[in-house]
Image (spheres, rainbow, N blue to C red):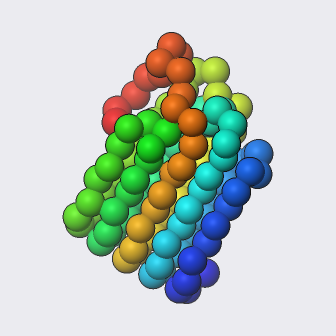
Amino acid sequence: MPAGEIKVEEIKGDKDIDLYAGQITVSSSHEWSYRSVNASVAIGEVRASAYDADKGGFFRTFTKRTVDGEYRLRAHVTTGEIDLVGRKTRAEGMRGPD
């Protein structure tokens, strides 16, 4: 999508979201079951409350791998903001860089 706001709420499954300018919000009231999370912005901010992460500025990326996760999430915004909103994940089974 070229510009605007994308909200993905309470949808299980793999997600691959691209936006040139604007905001992406992915939320769930259930525990996140992602085996791979990759969220990046060229200019802006990535907030991932489910992982206690908040990164802003230029060329910011948040990645996380979970051993027992089921789905894959990839989100990218060229200029804007990504919010990953959900319940905190369990510490066991986590690996990879923040």
Residue, x 54% and y 49% (percent of image)? Answer: 85
What quarter of the picture does the N terminus occupy?
bottom right
Q: Is residue 65 above or below residue 16?
A: above
Residue 6, image quadrant: bottom right
What quarter of the picture does the C terminus occupy?
top left
Residue, x 53% and y 85% (percent of image)? Answer: 3
Q: Is residue 36 above or below residue 68?
A: below
Residue 33, how many percent across, how many down?
A: 66, 33
Visible residue check, residue 36: no
Q: Is residue 35 left or right of residue 46?
A: right
Residue, x 53% and y 16% (percent of image)? Answer: 93
- Total numbered badges shown on the rendered structure: 0
Which residue appears farthest toward the top when viewing the image? 92
Q: Is residue 18 left or right of residue 14?
A: left
Residue 17, how many percent across, how many down?
A: 60, 64
Residue 29, how many percent across, how many down?
A: 67, 42
Q: Is residue 95 left or right of residue 25?
A: left
Which residue appears farthest toward the left when viewing the image? 57
Q: Nearer the viewer, residue 58 or 55?
A: 55
Residue 28, how many percent across, how many down?
A: 66, 46
Residue, x 57% and y 43% (percent of image)? Answer: 86
Q: Nearer the viewer, residue 2 or 45?
A: 45
Visible residue check, residue 96: yes
Q: Is residue 10 left or right of residue 48?
A: right
